[in-house]
Image: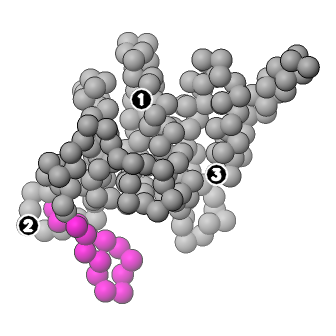
Amino acid sequence: MADIPGIRFAGSPDVDRARLPEAHVRPRQERGSQYLSWPSPGGGGTTSSSPAHHRAFADTKGMDMNTLARWVWEGLELPGIASDYHFLLQGAVEQLWSRRRSTPAGLQFVEIFAQLDLNLIEAVPQAVMVNSAKPSQGFFKIASVQTWMKLLEAEGALREALAVSQRAQRFGDDHRHEELEAKVAALDAEAR
């Protein structure tokens, strides 16, 4: 993911990219086509799914928090396209959020992964477009950002939640939270 222009991502902590078996896989692009084909994981053939895509859509429900976090960090080091990284991050955020009562320590990763996802989407908005050929159709709802805003509000970090909302509004009105805006305005009025 660090190779994506415009993203602020220096690389995954404690991951040696060179040791990941799929890190050196490279796609082929057929002449006259915009689509990439990747060598199949088992060898002998090709697939339209990158190594990062395989991580993004794998069943991770049985993974504990640390294993899931490691899975994501490694996945961000694998070859892929922007939407692969988005779905990897968003899936992890949703899963960690659903476990917040049993594993509250996972909330640290909710914030980290959601922030990375928003940075990614700001750098490559077409990763979350409904149809990149028709930008007027808009964007998919970005669940990781919505979850991050819920977390910030629950922690009482209303100004931070509003800042995230304002950053995300360019990707659709469903990221605008008028109630949050009103709360921050009330806090500002009290401080005067």
Residue bearing mark 2:
44
Query: Mark 3 to mark 2: distance in Å?
Result: 40 Å
Residue bearing mark 1: 109
Q: Is residue 96 magenta?
A: no
Answer yes or no: do the residues labelled 3 and 1 have beta carbons within 8 Å?
Answer: no
The numbered mark, 3 or 2, whose residue comes first in the sequence reads 2
- Residue 131 in the image, given as x and y percentages of width and height: 54, 64
Q: Earlier in the sequence, mark 1 or mark 2?
A: 2
Residue visible at 85% across and 23% down in the picture? 188
Mark 2 surroundings within 10 Å by alpha-carbon count, few (fewer than 14), some (14 through 19), many (20 or more): few
Q: Is residue 191 left or right of residue 2?
A: right
Coordinates of residue 50 in the picture (x, y in percent): 27, 59
> Cβ–Cβ below 8 Å for labels 3 and 2?
no
Query: On residue 171, which mark appears?
Result: 3
Q: N-terminal of the two: label 3 or label 1? A: 1
Spatial CA distance of label 3 from label 1 is 23 Å
Q: Residues within 10 Å of mark 1 (few under 14, many from 20)?
A: some
Mark 2 residue type: Gly
20 to 59, vertically: above or below: below
Label 1 element class: helix
- State the predominant SS element of the stretch in magenta: loop
Residue depicted at x 64% and y 45%: 168
User: Of circles 3 and 2, which is in front?
Assistant: 3
Q: Which residues are magenta?
A: 26-40
Q: Pick whichever, 191 or 107, lies toward us.
A: 191
Q: Position of residue 65 (x, y in %)?
A: 31, 24
| Callout 2 secondary element | loop
Inspect this view and state whether residue 57 appears. Answer: no
Q: Is residue 29 magenta?
A: yes
